Image: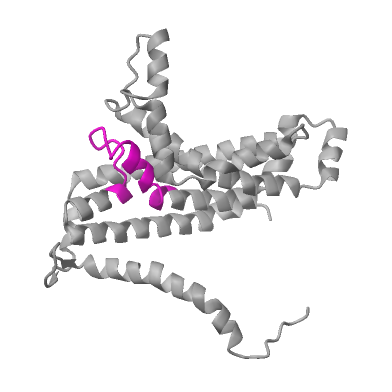
Amino acid sequence: MKRTVFANRWLPYLLVLPQVLVTLVFFFWPAGKSLYLSFFKSAPFGGNDVFVGLDNFRQLLTNPDYYDSVVNSFIFAGGVTALSVGGALLVATLANQKIRGLWFYRTALLWPYGIAPAVAGIIFLFIFHPAYGILPYYLAFVTAYDFNWLLKGWVAMTLVIVATAWTHIGYNIAFFLAGLQGIPASVMEAASIDGASPIRKFTAIIVPLISPITFYLVVVNMVFAFFASFGVIHAVTQGGPGNATEIMVFKLWKDGFIGLNLGSSAAQSVILMAIVIGLTMVQFRFVEKKVTY
């Protein structure tokens, strides 16, 4: 294998310097600041930080409302990951067929990924809001059922799960399409000659061959659901009704920016980061063994 040699020994370091700076400024510095603040009680409008040790964590772990947000986060992340990955695989399989105008369908399927989560939340708000939503308006003509997700927690949770999964499904479809197109046609033809049904080909050939992509997308979508779903929750439900859709990332924002309890908010961010890192490690430790490379 040919080895790349740079004329200037400092050029490789100069090329990676921008990415290193971005990582330091937007990841390591905020993470370090959150870890620091989690051990202090900070005045919201400035002043000296008072060291309180593990008191912020102790107060969180003895608060039942915090455990509710943890449970909500796991339900939310599990629903988003299952719906976005499973739905993307189904749609990508259909989009991989030889049909007229396939380029248009593939392009349209990727569009939702270009929509910001907050904007996606507003879109779903205009569709499902009980006062001015399009769907409740038309349902009123055909049924007496009052569709009001503002009063039912499980309906609100379902709504934000669907809205969040919709924002990420285009990203998943792109990866699945690439994986499906990489499957050799000879393998599928041989399975057809052997009399394999479409379902059999899907479960015995397609699923194992794209399992590395599936594993990657499960990890990415889980991290996305825990961290990057704030916009949808904030735009659609504000954590309600009650605290039914208050996930961890929304609660730490509310406690920090609304309640002005910076120490508790920082402690919540540390716990959230530890949970996501732990879940990722578990997936690489146990789930990756079932991946076919």
Residue 111: percent from the left, percent from the top? Answer: 57, 42
Nearer the observer, 3 or 276: 3
Relative to 137, is 174 on the left or the right? right
On-image quarter of the C terminus: bottom right
In the image, residue 230 lies in the stretch drawn in magenta: yes
Relative to 103, is 172 on the left or the right? left
Q: Who's the residue at 78% across and 34% down the image? A: 98
Q: Who's the residue at 32% across and 50% down the image? A: 249
Residue 13: percent from the left, percent from the top? Answer: 55, 83
On-image quarter of the N terminus: bottom right
Examine the rendering and report whether any part of residue 260 can be seen.
yes
Seen in the picture, residue 183 relative to 202 is either above or below; the reply is: below
Q: Which residues are magenta?
A: 225-250
Q: Who's the residue at 62% across and 35% down the image? A: 90
Residue 118: percent from the left, percent from the top? Answer: 39, 44
Q: Quadrant of residue 170?
A: top right
